[in-house]
Amino acid sequence: MSILSGQSAFFGLDIGTSAIRLVELRGGGKIKSLVKYAYVPISSTLTQTASKADEEVLAETIKDLISKAHLSTKNVAVGIPSQKVFTTVVEVDKLTPQEMEKSIKYQADSLIPTPLADSKIDWMIIGDSATNPNKVELLLSSVPNVFTNSRLEMLESIGLNVIAFEPDNLALTRALLDPDDPAAQLVFDLGNVNSDLVINMKGSAMLTRSITFGIEAIVRSAMQNLNVNRQQAEEVVFKFGLDKTKTEGNVYQAIINAVDSLASEIDKSIKFFANKYTNVKLEKIVVAGAAAILPEFPLYLATHTNINVEIGNAWRNVDYDKSRLNELLAVSNNFGVAVGLAERAE
């Protein structure tokens, strides 16, 4: 969802529910060099409410972070929380570009959940239909204007030049996957309150979902079943997770039902994809966010789905001084969206 184009220098800005993260890269091509990265934790209320006071605090927090990071540009590509974006894959007739534009606008009115006049629409041709040679598949996205306009005004008020908005899940996928790998792969990011799931094939998103389940639900399950406070629950969840051999399996038992509920949502997406693309095998699951650091979760997911699971590396397509390897890998699970935004081809 570009607003302007032709900007050669810009940074990626991820306004998350628990932190603000930014990344600036330099260079062209598939591999860009790391210039700066920075983050600051925030209260979840800042991004969960529409309060003018919270928006002002959020704006000042972003402004302060940018000032301390000493970025070289005011141009920014901004992530949009996936739960604010409606995304679907549709099939349309093969048409000329001009006819395609008209057809999509006509069809979008019946496909998107908000009125066309109140929405920003973006679309991209994925490729030929898997079932009909006379049709092509499109990735169609829409976001309410009220949200993007509000974000645009806030960021412009602190001197930034917004060159693009992009759904968080698509930016994340760009960062975590090899752009030249045509295999079907599922990217799963376990967030604080919501989680993102994308199945990518041949460099395109074939299925995207925002799941209203995050690490918060797992922590609450630990609080209730272990009768501990929030801080204690967070500590044991991230220390022991799904490791049955620790604490006599008590933490595992306290959270396994919640984790199973999450896995069932992942199962639904895998099944939907398999039913639509019957000749395609899902080769790999790449996990990010809390899913990358919750002990034994990758192994649990691999066993549950019988699909290879790997922990995502947000910096895989980024060049940096190798002396910083441990430093960057330690924060990789938090920077996928910001890196992916900074990797956009503008």
Image: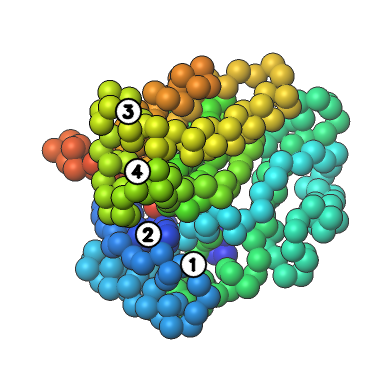
Q: Secondary structure at mark 4?
A: helix
Q: Secondary structure at mark 1?
A: helix
99 or 131: nearer the eye? 131
126 or 243: nearer the eye? 243
First in sequence, mark 3 or 2: give its number: 2
Q: Is residue 194 left or right of residue 43?
A: right
Residue at 33% in and 35% down:
251
> Do tag 4 and tag 2 residues touch (Cβ < 8 Å)?
no
First in sequence, mark 3 or 1: give its number: 1
Q: Residue furthest front?
A: 227
The amino acid on which the numbered mark 2 sits, given as a three-letter code, is Ser
Q: Secondary structure at mark 2?
A: loop
Residue at 28% in and 42% down:
236
Q: Residues within 10 Å of mark 4 (few under 14, many from 20)?
A: some
The amino acid on which the numbered mark 1 sits, given as a three-letter code, is Gln
Is residue 263 visible in the rendered image? The answer is yes
| Residue labelled with disc 2 | 18
First in sequence, mark 4 or 2: give its number: 2
Q: Quadrant of the N terminus?
A: bottom right
First in sequence, mark 1 or 2: give its number: 2
Q: Secondary structure at mark 3?
A: helix
| Residue labelled with disc 4 | 226
| Residue labelled with disc 3 | 249
Residue at 57% in and 22% down:
282
Q: Residue furthest left?
A: 323
First in sequence, mark 3 or 4: give its number: 4
Mark 3–mark 1 Cα distance, whole angstroms, equals 35 Å
The amino acid on which the numbered mark 3 sits, given as a three-letter code, is Gly
Q: Which mark is residue 48?
A: 1
> Do tag 3 and tag 2 residues touch (Cβ < 8 Å)?
no
